[in-house]
Amino acid sequence: MKIALVHDFLNQYGGAERVLDAFLEIWPKADVYTLLYDKNKMGKFYNKFNIKTSFVQKFPAFPPAGYKWWLMLFPKAIEKFNLKNYDLVLSDSSAFAKGVITHKPSLHVCYMHTPTRYLWSVTKEYLHDAPIPNFIRPIMPPFIEILKKWDYKAAQRPQYIIANSENVAKRIKKFYDRDADEIIFPYVDTKRFTIQGGEKKYWLVVGRQEPYKKTDLAIKAANKLGFNLIVAGSGTRIEKFVNIAGKNIKFVGRLPDNQIAKLFENSIGLIFPPEEDAGITPLESMAAGRPVIAYQKGGVKESITPGVTGEFFTKQTPENLAEAIKNFRPEKYDPAIIRNHAKKFDKASFKEKIIKFIENKI
């Protein structure tokens, strides 16, 4: 069986790339199509695979927007991929990958991380925070409308859609007028984590340090209450966060997986302030037996059991988060129970569900 995997971008490593990794473990000889591939950043992960890029790869990435200058060309670039003669096209998409054009008798299955966020759910925030010159912002809305029309059309192309959570399945119905054919929650690689004893002296935040991740809520709560906080991950907001952080807050940047695992294992727990489509980071904390305090919206409602694996705060404000942390009692949580809960979302189970779905449709 000849297989093509289609991925939006390979220019940073995160949850979507872990899903791609699982697909490549199942089908290591598959061709990988992506709009952009940053070999310097991502080569260590994907050098051994056959990566095929779009024509946008040849364009310059001028600051401050980088490749986002070519945003309006991305739909045409994804459509130009020649996917004839593939038995299976498996796209994993949070933006453009679902829009590839396939040909009968190819089967196109899309694993959808989310309907494109900046087109449907956080458009105002995107237009305010995007790394573009201010004079560009007022003329962006008409282009956003053009992209929305294309995005809706693109979402009708896959024969089947797998949603990464019930939360995303609801968005697919709302924005694309389609029912998800299956829900398969993303995985956590539980083998990377162990339960560690000893005193836990800090809370942890892990992720891309971008506006929608809301790390500033955790920083402001730590400033107010004085607890120790470690912030792991890189992004465009690091400098701003450092400037508002007290001495009790430490920034460690992007770390290798083994060091991140140790941070989880030795933390009081994870603070998770954003609204995520699914949310793998809370599962990583749980795999290490550590509880989570999360904002009560999005996919975390499907992975966190209050009073067993963590707690929720209900308003996305520093004050509400600080109150939740102040009232948190870590001693009441059993690390073994938390880890066993995370095992329900293990990689092996994820791969089995994907294989079963595909085999039933071929």
Image (cartoon, helix red, strand yellow):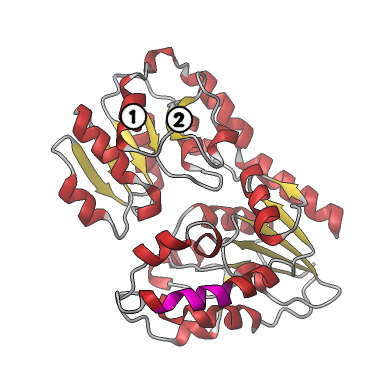
Which residue extends farthest left? 247
Q: Residues within 10 Å of mark 2 (few under 14, many from 20)?
A: many
In the rendered structure, the answer to whether residue 210 lies left or right of residue 46 reads: left
Q: Quadrant of residue 112?
A: bottom right
Residue in view at x 47 percent, y 16 percent: 334
Q: Earlier in the sequence, mark 2 or mark 1?
A: 1
Disc 2 to disc 1: CB gap under 8 Å? yes
Residue in view at x 43 percent, y 44 percent: 274
In the rendered structure, the answer to whether residue 133 lies left or right of residue 116 reads: left
> Which residue range is magenta in the image?
139-147
Q: Pinpoint residue 188: horizontal percent, then vertical percent.
A: 55, 41
Q: Residues within 10 Å of mark 1 (few under 14, many from 20)?
A: many
Position of residue 272 relative to residue 64, above or below, is above
Work out whether residue 243 or residue 321 is closer to the camera in this orientation and state it: 321
Residue in view at x 81 percent, y 71 percent: 106
Work out whether residue 176 or residue 52 is closer to the camera in this orientation and state it: 176
Q: What is the count of numbered marks?
A: 2
Badge 1 marks a residue whose secondary structure is loop
Position of residue 119 relative to residue 197, above or below, is below
Q: Pinpoint residue 321: horizontal percent, then vertical percent.
A: 35, 32
Q: Pinpoint residue 59: horizontal percent, then vertical percent.
A: 43, 86
Quarter in which the C terminus is drawn: bottom right
Q: What is the three-letter code of the residue carrying label 2?
A: Ala
Q: Quadrant of residue 322?
A: top left
Question: Which residue is disc 2 drawn over?
Answer: 288
Question: Which residue is disc 1 drawn over?
Answer: 267
Position of residue 60 relative to residue 200, above or below, is below
Badge 2 marks a residue whose secondary structure is loop
